[in-house]
Amino acid sequence: MNDFEKNELKKIAVKVRMGIIEGTFNAKSGHPGGSLSSADILTYLYFKEMKIDPENPRGENRDLFVLSKGHAAPGLYSVMAQRGFFPVEHLKTLRKPDSNLQGHPSMNLLAGVDMSTGSLGQGISAACGMALGLKLKNSENRVYSILGDGELQEGQVWEALMYAAAKKLDNLVAVVDNNNLQIDGTIEQVNSPYPIAEKFSAFGWNVIEIDGHCFDEIEKAYNSAKEHKGAPTAIIAKTIKGKDISFMENEVGWHGTAPNKEQYETAIAELNEKLNQLS
């Protein structure tokens, strides 16, 4: 990736974060913290990594994505809007009764969402099934998923990880958004899943640890995953909850709290300043 491409991805990621703030502010609810922490990974997936077509969102010849941490839907919707699946202005309808942008992604409401998620642990399980299905069809397409680090406390996650390794699903890549915070505190305080990398490795996965906000490291990890055969790949991405919003960063209270008008204006101003610096 050259410097121009990297800078373009950085600008898109800022716009994705703007959409997250826009959506949660207008909804007066939602989950901005974990959406902001995963914005760079989502940006890379939708603009660089995945084979997708916004004009044909259900086309058979596409890669599949499952947001296992379904509460981070504002991030998914925002990157989809930037990618052209629907108008960016539509983000303001987040969680409205007649909107197809509900609090958790629904494949029945929004074309381009490959799996309805929200109940933690079920998304990665569905991703395993998708990856196996593609294998059985001898398809070259791949499956991508993002899990929360707090989500790793769900037993179903580990059943899925064991299954993926047993079936040698090397067409599956799972990212753990390791921002270290969940709704009730740090993940250590609630129910520590550490050491995460060692546990994935013990379950038979190829494991890569990265800075989840560094596009060079993100690219290297996904390229490495494609080269690794015989096992699924887990990318353990160290991230910052509330990334790029000064008053939200590393603050557990922003897990599921929407910004008020003053906070919204401050956040958008900070992101506009960052965008100007990149232009």
Image (cartoon, helix red, strand yellow):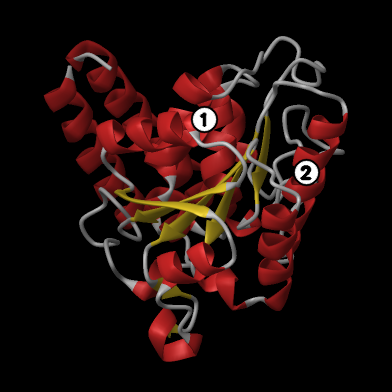
Query: Eyeballing the image, is 74 above or below 30?
Result: above
Q: Taking 11 as reference, is 177 left or right?
A: right
Dot 1: few (<14), some (14–19), or many (≥20) neighbours within 10 Å? some
In the structure shown, which secondary structural element does the residue marked by tag 2 occupy?
Answer: loop
> Can you give x and y, in whole percent of width and height, for residue 12 in the image?
36, 25
- Residue pointed to by mark 2: 115
The residue depicted at 80 percent of the width and 16 percent of the height is 59
Above or below, 268 relative to 216:
below
The disc at residue 265 is none
User: Which residue position is annotated with label 1?
Assistant: 226
* Whether residue 256 can be seen here: no
Label 1 and label 2: CA atoms lie apart by 22 Å
Q: Are marks 1 and 2 in contact (CB under 8 Å)?
A: no
Q: Percent from the top left, x then y, of residue 267?
A: 29, 47
Picture residue at 56% right of the left edge, 60% below the top: 29
Kind of residue at badge 2: Met
Question: Within the image, what quadrant is residue 172 found in?
Answer: top right
- Tell me the quadrant of the picture where the N terminus can be found: top left
Q: In this view, does 273 lie to the left or right of 168?
A: left
Position of residue 76 in the picture relative to residue 189 (left or right): right
Of callouts 1 and 2, which one flags the residue occurring earlier in the amino acid sequence?
2
Q: What residue type is labelled 1?
A: Lys
Q: How many residues crowd mark 2 within 10 Å: few (<14), some (14–19), many (20+)?
A: many
Asked whether residue 7 is in view, the answer is yes
Q: In which quarter of the image is the C terminus?
A: top left
